[in-house]
Image (cartoon, helix red, strand yellow):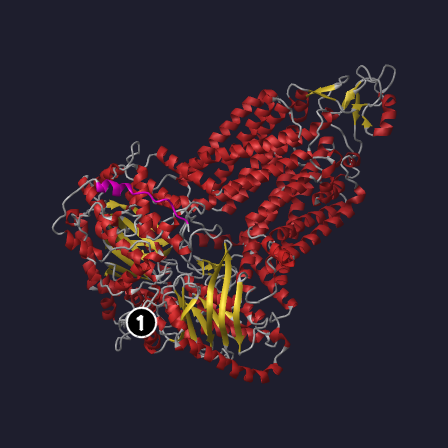
Amino acid sequence: MASHKKSEDPLVVKDRQEQECESSDSTIASENASEHRSPMGLIDEDGIETLNRIASQSSRRRSSVYPPNVPTRTSTLATISENDPAVDPQGPSFDLNKWLKMVLRESERQGREAHRTGIVFKNFTVSGTGAALQLQDTVSSMLSAPFRIGEMMKNRHSPPKRILNEFNGLLKSGELLLVLGRPGSGCSTFLKSLCGELHGLSMSKESVIHYDGVPQQRMIKEFKGEVVYNQEVDKHFPHLTVGQTLEFAALARTPAQRIRDMSREEFAKHITQVVMAVFGLSHTYNTKVGNDFVRGVSGGERKRVSIAEMALAHSPLAAWDNSTRGLDSATALKFVEALRLFADLSGSAHAVAIYQASQSIYDIFNKVVVLYEGRQIYYGPAKDAKSYFERQGWECPQRQTTGDFLTSVTNPSERKARPGMENQVPRTAEDFEAYWRKSPEYQKLMSEISHYEQEHPLEEEGDALATFQQKKREIQAKHTRPQSPYLLSVPMQIKLNTKRAYQRVWNDISSTVSTVISQIIMALIIGSVFYGTPDATAGFTAKGATLFFAVLLNALIAMNEINSLYSQRPIVEKHNSYAFYHPATEAIAGVVSDIPVKFVIAVVFNLILYFLAGLHRSAGQFFLYLLVTFIVMFVMSAVFRTMAAITQTVSQAMGLAGILILALIVYTGFVLPVPSMHPWFEWIHYLNPIYYAFEMLIANEFHGRDFICSQFIPAYPNLSGNSFVCSSAGAKAGQRAISGDDYIQVNYQYSYGHVWRNFGILIAFLVGFMMIYFIATELNSSTSSTAEVLVFRRGHEPAYLRTDSKKPDAESAVELSAMKPTTESGEGDMSIIPPQKDIFTWRDVCYDIEIKGEPRRLLDHVSGWVKPGTLTALMGVSGAGKTTLLDVLAHRTSMGVITGDMFVNGRGLDQSFQRSTGYVQQQDLHLETATVRESLRFSALLRQPPNVSIQEKYDYVEDVIRMLKMEDFAEAVVGVPGQGLNVEQRKLLTIGVELAAKPKLLLFLDEPTSGLDSQSSWAICAFLRRLADSGQAVLCTIHQPSAILFQQFDQLLFLARGGKTVYFGPIGQNSNTLLNYFESNGARKCADDENPAEWMLEIVNAGTNSEGENWFDVWKRSSECQGVQTEIDRIHREQQSKTQASDKDNESWSKSEFAMPFWFQLYQVTYRVFQQYWRMPEYIASKWVLGILSGLFIGFSFFQAKSSLQGMQTIVYSLFMLCSIFSSLVQQVMPLFVTQRSLYEVRERPSKTYSWKAFLIANIIVEIPYQIMMGILTYACYYYAVVGVQDSERQGLVLLLCIQFFIYASTFAHMAIAAMPDTETASAIVVLLFAMSLTFCGVMQTPTALPGFWIFMYRVSPFTYWVSAMAATQLHDRVVQCSPSEMSIFDPPSGQTCGEYMSSFMSMAGGQLSNPNATSDCNYCSVAVADDFLSSVNIYWSERWRNFGLMWVYIVFNIFLATMLYYTFRVKKWNLSGLKERFSKKK
């Protein structure tokens, strides 16, 4: 456990230096407020006893304890003795109540009051985009889009969907508002709207919302830190510690005037310690926050970090969206109690949405609002809400909490009318709203609003605004713009963000180190490839290639910043909404923090590359080279950061960056020199920063140097005069060396005179893109909100939606509910599920794992059984091992040591056990593109035995749909939240998938009510009850059931910390059996109005009974524990005798690992993946667009390549550029495969739905047709543009090679990702392998020029054979005609013609003379046909089909290696530690 050094708090030290008198009424106020004391260290073990005591007290509280009015004079509050340890947040007896009073007293002493505000909203209507009916897009709909323009325009202008309809309300300062409603009813939208977080949603013109008279628009513009929204999802920088995260928030909102003149740092440190103590986070100070990929605090602690962070915003109005999700009931209660205390003492107001509110939580709130399908059906005092709905005609069942009752009236299948009121109660959301508007409660509310508005009139420039502005100016730092919503000035924000940026770098130093190491490796590879390059004309091309690689690798390393910026954008936007800082200041800080990192990377990489590749060893040249590469790294960082800032999604940014990179590489000036550029694309090089950097590097390397000629024409001995010339560009007859300046002028049209001009241009690019980046970061938000909607397959939409889609009015979306088929009663037919006969038992199950080298026992001798027809609950305190036990029993663990015995009918488990059970996971993982019916059918087809026909399986699926009442959305697409199934529908589908498998043993469920509202939770548990009554065996973990829900279960297995059993047995009528056991063993008596489940958690959390004995020890010596063992023995004896006779009748498949044979699995899985791809038009379009745009861009950049030497070279370079999109092709495939693999490995493989071989092969197969199409499109766009029309054999072979290239890319992607845990890791490997394959393919450095130790890489690289086959096919037998600049011009000796002089040389070297009869200015071209040029780089026409065949070998090898890697690392799960362990055992 991480801890931090404790130092005496400065506030406590200063307190001890002062004395003051206590007011006479302090005792009364102190005692009254002590009821609200929020105990510190919510989860700390040493505070468990206090926590339990307060929890038990709170469960019996009533709302009358909490006065609705906020104290207005702090002098009436109790004064605190300054040496009281209760005000020290680092002390064990810290008391938030006393601390708050002390702070308020100090503020009053300095003449400051707490900032307070209320909120009024009238006729508040919010709408979202999107039609009520949305159809699933497919590849066919994408291709037919041009023929459906009318339909698309109609959908684009569809009326907005109304989410909130004419809400009215008043939330005063110091009040707590509870927001109740089922998922999808508009709770989140309501809370966001209160805080102005609309993000794409729109308010009607009639809507009125203001804060004590200040309009919302003005409030959000100038005071957005005063009204904040806490989102449901926890978003934090994972590598920052909890202390760093919260201290940053504290510093960002530290006021200019602080109590007792504390410094900013002292105040922030102190307030952070207070908040961490309040929310039980003190022990996590030095622990990383973490996320799904970075190890850090637990999920519950991360939720509390989110709560604490927003609490540090010190906002007078806060909205909390399901902020108790993932917290147990005790912790949730402490959170709400803390809000109550803040509201009472500081006057803040809070609106809180809670899906499952216990009675003790409900009683804390002043007001409650109930939402029903976007309509307000009650808003008023919480204590009156129950009587309002009972008067309406609804019956509240005994022991049902008020919150559950209020939510239940919005659920047609759960609400129950009082006898005699069945025909009088409202039914639809419209009916409820109409009843509310006619009620006296509504009239009272409107009257309150009217009176409140008289006191706080809505004015653009009124007293309220002046008060807000004055209070804000008091707490704003110097030099802060008065209209700014931020408390810190811009320089202070930059300083604070920069500090945090460096903390992030330091905390994730391994990432920086890995980047440096990878750059060192690349520098060593590239440098060694060009090692030994001579300082002569033979090294000209190699030097150009070296500098080309240098500028590219320095520039393109910044592309990774797109992903990192998108990962942090939601965090930055959240902080901006809290008014912590301008997003632009965080962007500036990110750039500043990158300077030292980029400097280290640039120095390390370029130092190695420069000297290893043999570049000019002169101090001036080296430091200019270093400066240019460093600047270009920053320029391209600014470019890629701008790409991230101006786009809305990471896929948009990466797509834009991919096209940009292609353009930057082609128009750098190396692969396509300026003289060879075509006018339609030539302008690009003027906008290319890399072009200017490359010109500087080339000029820097060649300027002022003469290079000895490596080859003369003709190569005769004793040449003199002008009878010879050097073979390189820029040569002059009779000279034995070439000026570097002449060479770069002729070959590149570069000049050293441009160096400092280009440097200025680079600086201009840097400043320009940085400014665009900062502005875009400030203005462009990726947060968006839309109306939730179901998506259906085309042609399968329900009738009520088809009717609704024809309505033109905007009310149609709200009226949707009236058209839906509603069923207020009736239950699914359970008779279709065959009753189970087998009994599952387990005895003395233990589970041990190793954590940081230390053994830890998670389960300790757990015994029990699950019988058909029983519903067994598995409960326990947080961290007791509930899910762990479920995983162990279901055989879903992949690590650790399991001991003990598990039996079915008294016999050991066989390999069919996993597919014979159903396991409903807590996470609702499904294929997003499949419909509900398809998901169920897939499960039935592959998990039901082969002796059941396909039609019978389909019929059974329809029965499951009816049983779960999913008919209305059976053809709906699973989709994603917001555009697809809602939370409840997803949970029903998860259960349905397991039921469709028809498990013959039992059904496991892990937290089936997680994330659901109370009514959905009740519906799920009632369904499980019916399942059990029909003969099923069900074992279910459950977090905090209500009393009425708890009665649904027959048996209970309760675990204490460490996986220790404290009870297993029947619950009994009204929980009597369970209560009698605990009460007879020393537990306090459970009150009649208490929830037995919460009561039991409280007494077990206490640790011991009245005699001080541990509950685990009590259980071990109890007669009930002995009875469990006796019953297990009896079950085994009975069942073994019954099963012996039936064993002979078992089919062979009944014992197999999978229900269906492999080929059936492969067919079904392949069909599903094909279907998935077809329904992902954006993925397929991204593939085809990449192929088409790349082909067109490369094709028209190298359009109709000339027959000159440069033309031959550009054709080869065009192939090199085509290869350069390989990495993008691979990057497209891998993320989708990871998504598929997650679904398979988390849900489908443990259920033994189908084999891993079927999964892998199906994914490889389905990619191939789309890669073929991509190859055809790229071929058509590239080939004819570059070389025109050739004979049919060549056209056919190039087409085959293009298709082969894309197939190779997809199989390479599967090979690379097969064993890797995530796309990021695989991408790093792909980039390295791709870079090496491209470097050694023979284009940039010919095989003859490669150092001997690298020649094997030339032969291993697959691109060697592909480029060779493509180049040979395109260039064979092509006659070369050198351009004038490529001609070697010299004079023959006197008396000889050019032909006579060159005859002997040409007989050996080849080539051609354009003027053989001339006696001066011989024009010699070193190549006559392209085959001569190709042979110089080891490319031969005769090897084209061999190379084509070798590429198929690589493809087969990729598939084979993907299979082996997946089997080794994902199926057998080998790792280095495992290999080490095996080796040590052998020794």
Quarter of the rendering containing residue 1335: top right
Query: Which x, y percent locates residue 1266?
Result: 63, 53
Left or right: residue 823 versus residue 682 is left
Is residue 1256 in sight in this rendering? yes
Is residue 1281 in sight in this rendering? no
Task: Please report the bounds of the magenta region as a residue range.
Answer: 2-16
Q: Mark 1 points at which residue?
A: 1082
Q: Determine if the magenta segment contains residue 3.
A: yes
Q: For the residue labelled by badge 1, is the local secondary structure a helix, a strand or a loop? A: loop
Question: Hey, what amino acid is under mark 1?
Answer: Gly
Q: Determine if the magenta segment contains residue 501.
A: no
Number of marks in the rendered image: 1
Query: Which x, y percent locates residue 225?
Result: 31, 44
Q: Which quarter of the rendering shows the C terminus?
A: bottom right
Left or right: residue 1001 versus residue 527 is left
Left or right: residue 1263 versus residue 270 is right
The residue lying at 75 percent from left, 49 percent from top is 1446
Query: Which x, y percent locates residue 340?
Result: 25, 55
Badge 1, how many Cα within 10 Å: few under 14, some, many 20+?
A: some
